[in-house]
Amino acid sequence: METRRWTNPHQPQTLQVAVILLYISAVFQLIFPSWLYASFGARLGAAALVSLLAAAAMGAGAFGIANDRKWGYNLAVAVTGVGVFELLIQLSGDLSRIVSPSFLLLALFPVARFALLVHPMSRQHQRIWFQ
């Protein structure tokens, strides 16, 4: 019998925390669609759609990681990388924003998720154990 789980306590702590942060970020993205990814989508003309896709990708990526799937890990790294890239684009226009509390709060989750996902312990675990 194949089991499906939302979290996996047998994974390294870095992946466990990344999965939880991905779920939290997906919920925030659904509640506040103008948050981070929507500004990226505004340039494309489809802010609400990009925001919804980002939330779905974060949730699916977290679920895939919890169930030891490489596609979940790759999806989570990709959607988080887009978020970090968007932060860098927003920062490139005005470097004084880096000390503003609103920017630091906005950058907290994507940067933490990215650091946890690309941590050597996370990468090694997914390389060995994920299918």
Image: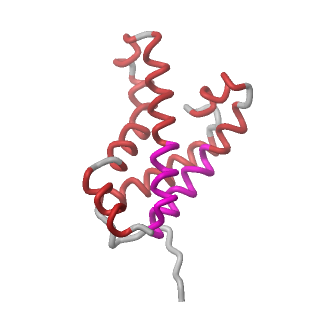
Image coordinates of residue 93 in percent, x first then y, are 47, 10
Image coordinates of residue 1 in percent, x first then y, are 54, 89
Task: Report the colour scheme.
Answer: secondary structure
Decide if residue 126 is on the left or right side of residue 78. left
Image coordinates of residue 87 in percent, x first then y, are 46, 26
Residue name at image x 66 percent, y 22 percent = 43
Decide if residue 110 is on the left or right side of residue 48. left
Q: Which quadrant does the C terminus fall into? A: bottom left
**Residue closest to the far left:** 120
Residue name at image x 47 percent, y 29 percent = 85
In the image, residue 18 above or below residue 80? below
The picture quadrant where one finds residue 34 is top right
The picture quadrant where one finds residue 13 is bottom left
Image coordinates of residue 27 in percent, x first then y, are 57, 49
Residue 128 belongs to the span the image colors magenta: no
Decide if residue 97 is on the left or right side of residue 32. left
- Total marks in image: 0
The picture quadrant where one finds residue 50 is top right
Which residues lie in the magenta part?
54-79
The secondary structure making up most of the magenta span is helix
Front one among 126 and 53: 126
Residue 69 belongs to the span the image colors magenta: yes
